[in-house]
Amino acid sequence: MKHPALWRSAIAGGLVLALEVLCRTGVINAFTMIPPSKMLVALANMMRHADWFWADARYTFQNVAAAIVLSIVPGFLIGLVIHALPRLRRVLNPVLLSYYSVPTFVFYPLLIVIFGIGQLSLTIMGAMFGVVAMISSTLTAIDRIPRVYGKVARVMRINRWRTALRITLPAATPHLFTGVKLAVAYSVIGVIAGEFILATAGLGRRLSLSFNEFDNATMYGLILLIFIVVAIINGVLQRWEARIYRRWYRA
Amino acid sequence: MKQRWSDYLMLVVGLAVLWQLAYYFAGPDAIAPPWQTLQRLAIIVRQEPFWENARATGSAFLYAAVLALSGGLVIGIAIGSSAAAHEILSPILETLYSIPKIVLYPVILLVFGLGPAAKIAFGALHGFFPVTLFAIGAIRNIQPVLLRTARVMRLAPLSLARHILLPAALPEIVTGLRIGFSTTLLGTLIGELFASSQGLGFMLIHAMDSHNVPDIMALTFLLFLVATCANAIILAIEHHVRAHAA
């Protein structure tokens, strides 16, 4: 295959076009879905005219950013601690393995009761969703560092801090980045889902409002926006990850 | 890592202690203590409405799981078998996988209407992508030398599938099925949280609306227990398969 990206765009474009035709010809009625072109127009109008748009977008963005920080930093540190204590790791192992099989959203009502409706609950929801992926990736990352690196460091009498900074961290980077990628994706999902379920502001909240008011233009505009943002974030992280892997595993 | 019984015991005791501490910290308005939650759960499961709701959730989940797992397997294996299809389609599938599915919930409701069809579709939507992606990965990760050896030995297509492809890809496929199983359950329950008139998710949102903390805790705990046990069972199967494949 010579031009996979070209083929990919062609397929995605074809699907969008098919959707457009189906909507325009009335095979899919206007109450169910509006044509993609109208979604785009609705999104553009929203960004220019709706007084709530930028405030809600900022609200969601702040929550997501805070949730990402709160899953990556504590996730990494907790991962380090768990790795240093094998006994603790054995005890926690079942939790780490089955964490994502528990519908985390069932804890959201509890968070609201404890922390109230607002940015704190939403941020914690997003972080709860992302932090375990980061912990697991940190453990894998340290596990996969070849032992010989540590031996070389000892032979060369490099002190502990320099070993950690110059040898352990770089060697662990690829797997750590996988954790970062997952933590970002999960934080976005957690925050937007939380807003959708119960919140006072945010794009997720706006989405559920527009759905309840049968405001299809706003609803599909927002869905399109979230699609685009997630696709961009995902694309950037995928490319970055590929570059890191190429750099570390150049064989 | 060999797990010992004392590890599980420590885990359960540790979680119970944390729970109790959280109760002292947050107070009875927010959290019910472990013992009270268990008592409440024992009462709930003895009432008739609970079993009706559990049946509704169970059947919706079953339909969704069959759709997601079979669809994901077929499509994943088909895409994985072709290098070109993999290269073109996998990035699209990965992006679709990382989109918060909840934003599609209104669309699902508009298409399928209120009722069980919507939550089945929503559950299946959650389960489909991980199963597909893991199946693709499983097929793509088969070592080329195995396939070359098979060609040298002139294996017929059927025995190729039976003796080479299946054993080599099975462990990763089972991992995908396990994750798909959990995400399908997640999707079905989220589907019930909104716009639904029965099911365990509906019971939970009802308890939330009436601010019934013991009920919220009991149902949350039950869902946690069911999900963890199901996961543990499939994980055991996975270990078994991996041990035999190695």
Image: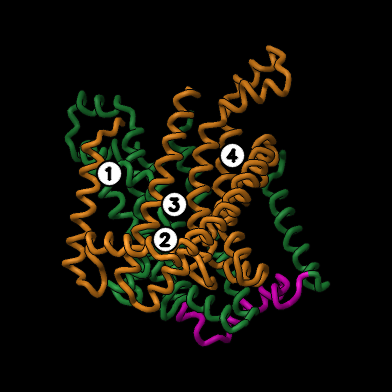
Where is residue B190 drawn, in percent x and y?
49, 64
Distance between the alpha carbons at the discs numbered 3 and 1:
20 Å
Label 2 – label 3 distance at C-alpha: 8 Å
Q: Nearer the viewer, residue A157 or A106?
A: A106
Does the segment drawn in magenta span residue B234?
A: no
Tell me the SS state at disc 2: helix
Q: Is residue A37 above or below residue A154?
A: below
Dot 3 falls on a residue whose secondary structure is helix
Chain A, chosen colour in render: green
Q: Between marks 1 and 4, how big is the CA–CA gap?
A: 28 Å
Give the mark, 2 or 1, whose residue is nearer the N terminus: 1
Tell me the amino acid under the disc marked 3.
Answer: Leu
User: Which residues, given as a range, are shown in magenta?
Assistant: A28-56
Question: Disc 3 marks which residue?
Answer: A182
User: For the residue marked with disc 1, what is the amino acid?
Assistant: Leu
Amino acid type shown at disc 4? Ala
| Residue bearing mark 1 | A92
- Residue B36: x, y in percent? 24, 64
Dot 1: chain letter: A
In the rendered image, the residue lying farthest to the right is A25
* Chain B drawing hue: orange
Looking at the figure, which quarter contains the N terminus of chain A?
A: top right
Q: Nearer the viewer, residue B225 or B70?
A: B225
Name the residue type under label 2: Ser
Disc 4 and disc 2: Cα gap in Å? 25 Å
**Residue drawn 35% across the image and 39% down it:** A141
Chain letter, disc 2 residue:
A
Please state the chain letter of the residue tagged with numbered disc 4 in the rendered image: B
**Is residue A151 depicted above or below A11 in this figure?**
above
Q: Position of residue B116 (x, y in %)?
A: 60, 64
Q: Name the residue carrying label 4.
A: B135
Q: Are marks 3 and 4 on the same chain?
A: no
